[in-house]
């Protein structure tokens, strides 16, 4: 029988044999997510290469140690045969097409790769490789709309609507991560974090009715709006030039200032103070005047409240994601 699964010329083969050959071929060529991979089987698929190291084995030969990732998980991999030649085809941070065989080593699933090829930019959807929120995006967007309705001041509500619900930043806001490697570091993470902080605002305002609930809720929903322009999307999350050189606090202040039509000047300044101070007293206009445990450095109780609630959600989420129990 030849390599295609057919007998010599003039020899017929059974339908069962044909079906078996097709099944084997399909299994070998199927693109599988990392969560679907099983030891002892061959596989191929599209993944992000998040680490690539050229190492020297004990026998003096070189090999590649690689970490592959998709939205379902990560997979350590090795290239032993023709490692230097194959290594020229891709770099860490590339989206790649990889083919090989799976095995277990010290209880861990590991791939030995026969071939790796970079996928050209534009030839893939970043959502194939980037982690995403477990919660439903539709559910989170519904919560965001509900929280926006809790802003009863018409000018503040209009600003929230323009930036988060209907304007050009609305779609990027629902897509962005909150960080690249800290808390909420996945597609939809910014939306999830914002909804969490807004929910905490609602509870806090019930306990402390003297707080300006409209100002605090609007600030909570807009505090990270600058992150819609901070990230880039490929096989991994990156930082835009604007994000690297300006940062999301200043970007957010620019976005709020450019959309704040109809908002009285005093209200605009109160809102900007909350947004610019939400990383703590050192980040705002009064930075450096007091430690994080003091109310000094904040010009309003609302700014202090936003700082505390933002830090609470970020730190608790970070602890849960990184295994602290």
Image (cartoon, helix red, strand yellow):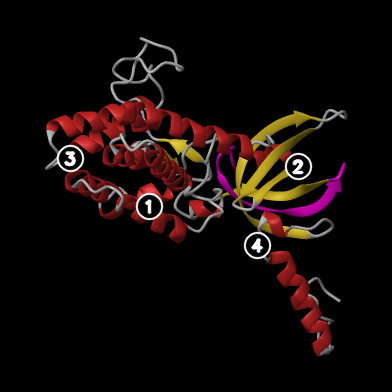
Instruction: Residue 31: give its label.
Output: 4
| Labels 4 & 3 near each other (Cβ < 8 A) | no
In space, the residues marked 1 and 2 are separated at their CA atoms by 44 Å
Query: Which type of secondary structure does the marked residue at label 3 adopt?
Result: loop
In space, the residues marked 4 and 3 are separated at their CA atoms by 48 Å
Provide the residue designation for mark 2. 78
Q: Nearer the viewer, residue 94 or 2?
A: 94
Provide the residue designation for mark 1. 144
Any part of residue 10 in sight: no
Relative to 218, is 129 on the left or the right? right
Relative to 252, is 293 on the left or the right? right
- Counting residues from the start of the chain, the first of labels 1 and 3 encountered is 1
Query: Which type of secondary structure does the marked residue at label 2 adopt?
Result: strand
- Counting residues from the start of the chain, the first of labels 2 and 3 encountered is 2
Region in magenta:
89-107
Relative to 321, is 65 on the left or the right? right
Query: Which type of secondary structure does the marked residue at label 4 adopt?
Result: loop
């Amino acid at each position: 029988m030849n390599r295609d699964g057919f007998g010599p010329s003039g020899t017929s083969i059974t339908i069962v044999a044909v079906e078996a050959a097709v099944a084997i071929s399909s299994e070998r060529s199927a693109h599988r997510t990392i969560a679907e991979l099983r030891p002892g089987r061959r596989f191929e698929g599209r993944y992000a290469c998040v680490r690539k190291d050229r190492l020297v084995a004990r026998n003096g030969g070189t090999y590649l140690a690689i970490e592959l990732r998709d939205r379902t998980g990560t997979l350590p991999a090795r290239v032993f045969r023709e490692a230097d030649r194959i290594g020229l085809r891709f770099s860490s941070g590339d989206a790649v097409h990889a083919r090989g065989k799976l095995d277990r080593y010290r209880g861990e699933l590991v791939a030995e790769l026969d071939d790796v090829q970079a996928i050209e930019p534009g030839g893939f959807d970043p959502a194939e490789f980037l982690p995403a929120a477990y919660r439903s995006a539709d559910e989170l967007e519904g919560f965001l709309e509900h929280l926006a309705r809790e802003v009863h001041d018409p000018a503040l509500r209009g600003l929230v609507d323009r930036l988060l619900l209907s304007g050009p930043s609305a779609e990027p806001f629902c897509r962005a991560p909150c960080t690249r490697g800290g808390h909420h570091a996945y597609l939809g993470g910014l939306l999830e974090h914002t909804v969490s902080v807004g929910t905490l605002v609602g509870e806090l305002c019930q306990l402390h009715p003297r707080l300006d609930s409209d100002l605090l809720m609007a600030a909570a929903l807009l505090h990270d709006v600058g992150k819609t322009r901070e990230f880039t999307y490929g096989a991994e999350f990156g930082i835009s030039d604007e994000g690297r050189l300006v940062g999301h606090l200043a970007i957010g202040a620019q976005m709020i200032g450019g959309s704040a039509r109809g908002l009285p000047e005093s209200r605009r300044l109160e809102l900007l103070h909350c947004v610019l101070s939400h990383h703590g007293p050192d980040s705002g206009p009064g930075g450096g005047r007091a430690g994080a445990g003091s109310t000094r450095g904040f010009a309003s109780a609302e700014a202090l409240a936003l700082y505390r609630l933002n830090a609470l959600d970020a730190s608790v989420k970070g602890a849960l994601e990184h295994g602290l129990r």
